[in-house]
Amino acid sequence: MRKDATVVSSLFLAAALILPAVNSWTAEGHAPRSAPPDAVQEAQTPRDVPQNRPEQQKGNHDQSDLFSATKAEPSSTAFRNQPDEGKTLGFEFYRDPLDAKKPMTTFQEVRQKDVAEKPKVMETQRRLLESRYDLRPRLSPDVRMSRGKPVAVGPTARLGEGTSWEKLAALPPAEIRSRNLFPYPPLPHPKQVNGGQVFPQMQIDMFPRLQRFDVDFDLPEPFLPEFPPAIFLQNRPELGDVSRGEVVSINNYYRLFKNLLTPVQLDGLRMLVTPFPQEEFNPTDDRKSDRPSLGVACFDCHVNGHTTAQFHLSPDIRPQERRFRLDTVSLRGLYNQQIHASKRSLRSVEDFSEFEQRTAYFNGDEIHAAKKGMNVISRVQVAHMAQMQNMFDVPPAPKLDPAGYLASERASQAELAGQKVFFGKGRCGTCHPAPFYLDQQMHDLQLDRFTREPGDGPIKTFTLRGIKESPPYLHDGRCLTLEDTVKFFDLVLGLRLTQEEQDNLVAFLRVL
């Protein structure tokens, strides 16, 4: 009886600690600030001016339909006797929007259809997410990211009726698959047929040019990284976070970094904050932004050299329905990484940057990139970009020694026990060895053993340094918290970890 009372008291205490953490992050203490001027938005938006001069007035000729392709006069009357009267009646790549169902489809028609579908698209995604997860955030009262955002606590996955984690761990993969019980199936893009880069609302609030008319971001903000994220430079470690609480953009990069970076690095940063045409943000009718756009910058996705969980589709797979959702990864610690891209295994950041610029960012498609404005940058500028990207460091981990292991005098018992699980029973260290906690390899988890999807094949290992600041987890973000991630691998690897071992493992991951 006394034990039960103690448990109840502990639960009330935990609730008392967690609820203020939730309120402090979502209430008046973090009210949204007004967005600063966006130089890119201003550059691509013409201003209204008085129509006073005669040459500004539009006449009947200006407003006629003579400019339509269907009104063009043929160069020869003999075409009347030729097939299709000499006209191209089918789809024209350069003119018609991507995935148009008929030739001569206009941007207005595409937009109208997408806008009409959007409420149903997002409601369908919301119902899917709520069927899989408990999306009510539980925030840690004491674990925070570098700039103070509390870390969300899990697990969030919903289990099937009558199922517990213990029962699930005891089932063979084939039975989990046949009964459709796996709690972490692939997380889909809200609108697969359009796909493409989707930005979280907190970023759109600051940069409205990143708003799409066809789809919105789908995960709640408490499960995302900080915005703005901290910035750590490996050439100036004594400075700690150098972001100064700002989102680095074309507006402020020079002011923030002219005294911290070399001229080469600063020029690389200039390239990283310069927008170029992207599949969904460009001047053509293929775009998903209301107005024609200069595009997006590398740092629109890799905010402050990190991420705020923007997602798109894997560029490495076709057809469209076979592609999978892919989260933006952090650039922190890039200097220690030998392969890049989830599946392509590109061997230098120079090759990666050049390839993505040439293919309209993460679409693996030079054909459509050429239509939107393929950006072929010189190898000199590519090298400058790489110099800058290699400056981003992982957050400090004061409890780790130089070899990447816990210093026993600075670590808690739970963290030390978690390290033992990590390198022992948990088998985490097989793919994530110290000191940087990645093995420069690609691994296939063979998830088709558990789900009815075909599996993803080999995916590169990501570093676990600073991992608590990069939710959600796995390549598609299907694990919203570190607790979910530990549950995922406990099932996939058949570890049968006890709940205490899992809790300790999470405690260790949080200090990496």
Image: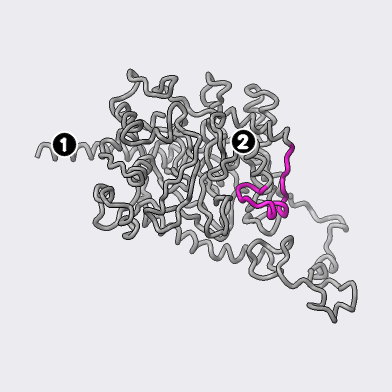
Closer to us: 23 or 480: 480
Q: Residue at x 24, y 56 (%)?
A: 162
Residue 369: x, y in percent? 69, 51
Residue 63 part of the magenta segment: no
Mark 2 is on which residue type?
Val
Residue 475: x, y in percent? 48, 45
Count of marks, rendered view: 2
Q: Is residue 136 above or below residue 438?
A: below
Q: From which residue to which does the magenta span run?
A: 359-378
Residue 364 part of the magenta segment: yes
* Residue 327 shown left or right of residue 501 in the figure: right
Q: Is residue 282 above or below residue 139?
A: below
User: Distance between the Cα atoms at labels 2 and 1?
Assistant: 54 Å
* Residue 71 shown left or right of residue 509 in the figure: right
Q: Between tags 2 and 1, which lies in front?
A: 2
User: Label 2 belongs to which residue?
Assistant: 349
Residue 417: x, y in percent? 29, 29
- Comes first in the chain, label 2 or label 1: 1
Residue 111: x, y in percent? 62, 62
* Structural crowding at the residue carrying mark 2, measured as other residues with C-alpha within 10 Å and reported as few (<14), some (14–19) or many (≥20): many
Q: Residue at x 60, y 44 (%)?
A: 207
